């Protein structure tokens, strides 16, 4: 497709096949930009949380004892890469589909979201032309589509050099249900070597590693499946296994107490929502559990769609579907739970929510 201008009229219907192809290319362009900023050595980190140690808007934290920046003290970090990635994705989506496509991006309204000068490369609309998409996904009513963009998931880990946890997440919901998603992993393969994480020493990549090229992109659609990574066959998982993956950086004693109710045989502490979703899809964990508020719909939409696309379930911690309505709060305040099988084993009883409020209020920043 030729690069559209920002004056393009939004079409009444869009095919999911086409939209996913566009999002696939834009996630890769965003990943290129994230790597470029990382390689430059200047992340330009600020704290989005006004109650954080540094206060919103400061471009860097005070130097730590060794003269470096103490990224661990930042409560809710944002870097230049989060901003640039969102500009690339949203700017180009608006340029291609016009101003009436509904998009929710983590970084809010940014300057230049009209996308002037942003088109990174020719964006293809036909990458998945050979895939069998159900008829009803070929003409989605644009007014019922929302795109949920997490331009850089795992920012805290990004600032700590645990870049293998970073993903770019583009979720597509239709009539408030997650139906499609793209998960791009920028720091895998090429020259990027996984830095040892003492909190997760045995972490293995869920996506293929290509020494020649950095970056891998996974996509999925309900009714189609997931492409771009090996998906575990549920019949190959030992029947009574119960390994959970959960937050690396928002861990707390009250969260630990809630996890104990699920009687896990192992807990993998992994950064970012996208990387944990991929871990479940690959069979590295049996459930992604986060029984407290904190994640937002842009953290979950893409992986929600991918998990459902392979027959799994993605719900809040009580087993209820997550509603992707752009007109209500974007917070997943009832936590989340993703599994490919035995979902009910990890669903919490409603009264576990009493502790949960406490857990949600606590902020443990490691
Ligand atoms: P985590 O599992 O801690 O790596 O978090 C996954 C995603 O949810 C990341 O984008 C986090 O920034 C976000 N998140 C989770 N908990 C919180 C919280 N308490 N406050 C702010 N963001 C959170
Ligand atoms: Mg995120
Ligand atoms: Mg983010």
Image: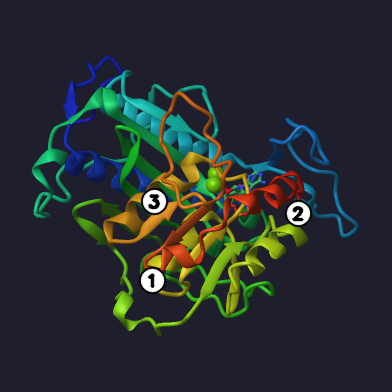
Few, some or many residues within 10 Å of mark 1 (<14, 14–19, 20+) = some
- Report how far apart the C-alphas of labels 2 and 1 lie in the structure: 28 Å
- Residue drawn at (17%, 26%), measured in percent from left and top? 13
Q: Which residue is mark 1?
A: 282
Mark 3 near ligand 2 (CB under 8 Å)? no
Q: Of callouts 2 and 1, which one flags the residue occurring earlier in the amino acid sequence?
A: 1
182 versus 6 height, above or below: below
Colour basis: rainbow
Report the image quarter containing ligand 3.
top right
Q: Earlier in the sequence, mark 3 or mark 2?
A: 3
Q: Which residue is mark 3?
A: 304
- Asked whether disc 3 touches disc 2, contact meaning CB atoms under 8 Å apart, the reply is no
Sooner in the amino-acid sequence: mark 1 or mark 3 = 1
Location of residue 31 in the rendering, given as x and y in whole percent from the top left corner: 43, 50
Using the image, tell me which numbered label, if any, was put on residue 365.
2
Dot 1 lies on which element? helix
Q: Report helix, strand or loop for mark 2.
A: loop
Question: Real-space Cα distance between discs 3 and 2?
Answer: 26 Å
* Observer-nearest of 44 and 271: 271
Residue 6, percent across and down? 31, 19
Q: Position of residue 286 (x, y in %)?
A: 46, 71
């Amino acid at each position: 497709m030729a690069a559209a201008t920002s004056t393009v009229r939004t079409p009444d219907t869009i095919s999911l096949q086409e939209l996913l192809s566009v999002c696939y290319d834009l996630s890769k362009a965003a990943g290129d930009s994230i790597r470029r900023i990382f390689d430059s050595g200047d992340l330009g980190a600020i704290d989005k949380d006004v109650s954080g140690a540094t206060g919103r808007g400061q471009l860097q934290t005070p130097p730590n004892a060794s003269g470096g920046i103490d990224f661990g003290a930042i409560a809710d970090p944002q870097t230049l890469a989060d901003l640039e990635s969102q500009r690339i994705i949203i700017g180009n989506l608006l340029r291609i589909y016009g101003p009436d496509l509904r998009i929710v991006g983590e970084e809010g309204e940014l300057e230049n979201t009209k996308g002037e000068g942003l088109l990174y490369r020719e964006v293809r609309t036909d990458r998945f032309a050979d895939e069998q998409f159900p008829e009803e996904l070929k003409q989605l009513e644009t007014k019922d589509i929302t795109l949920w963009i997490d331009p850089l998931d795992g920012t805290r880990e990004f600032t700590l050099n645990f870049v293998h946890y970073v993903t770019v997440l583009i979720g597509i919901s239709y009539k408030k249900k997650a139906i499609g998603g793209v998960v791009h992993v920028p720091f895998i393969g090429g020259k990027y070597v996984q830095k040892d994480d003492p909190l997760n020493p045995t972490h293995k990549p869920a996506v293929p590693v290509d020494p020649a090229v950095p970056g891998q992109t996974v996509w999925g659609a309900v009714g189609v499946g997931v492409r771009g990574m090996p998906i575990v066959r549920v019949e190959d998982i030992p029947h009574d296994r119960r390994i959970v993956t959960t937050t690396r950086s928002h861990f707390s004693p009250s969260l630990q107490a809630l996890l104990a109710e699920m009687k896990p045989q192992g807990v993998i502490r992994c950064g970012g929502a996208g990387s944990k979703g991929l871990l479940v899809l690959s069979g590295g964990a049996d459930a992604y559990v986060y029984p407290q508020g904190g994640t937002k719909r842009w953290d979950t939409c893409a992986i929600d769609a991918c998990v459902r696309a392979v027959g799994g379930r993605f719900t809040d911690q009580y087993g209820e579907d997550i509603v992707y309505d752009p007109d209500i709060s974007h917070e997943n305040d009832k936590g989340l739970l993703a599994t490919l099988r035995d979902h009910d084993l990890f669903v919490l009883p409603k009264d576990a929510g009493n502790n949960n409020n406490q857990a949600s209020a606590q902020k443990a920043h490691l």
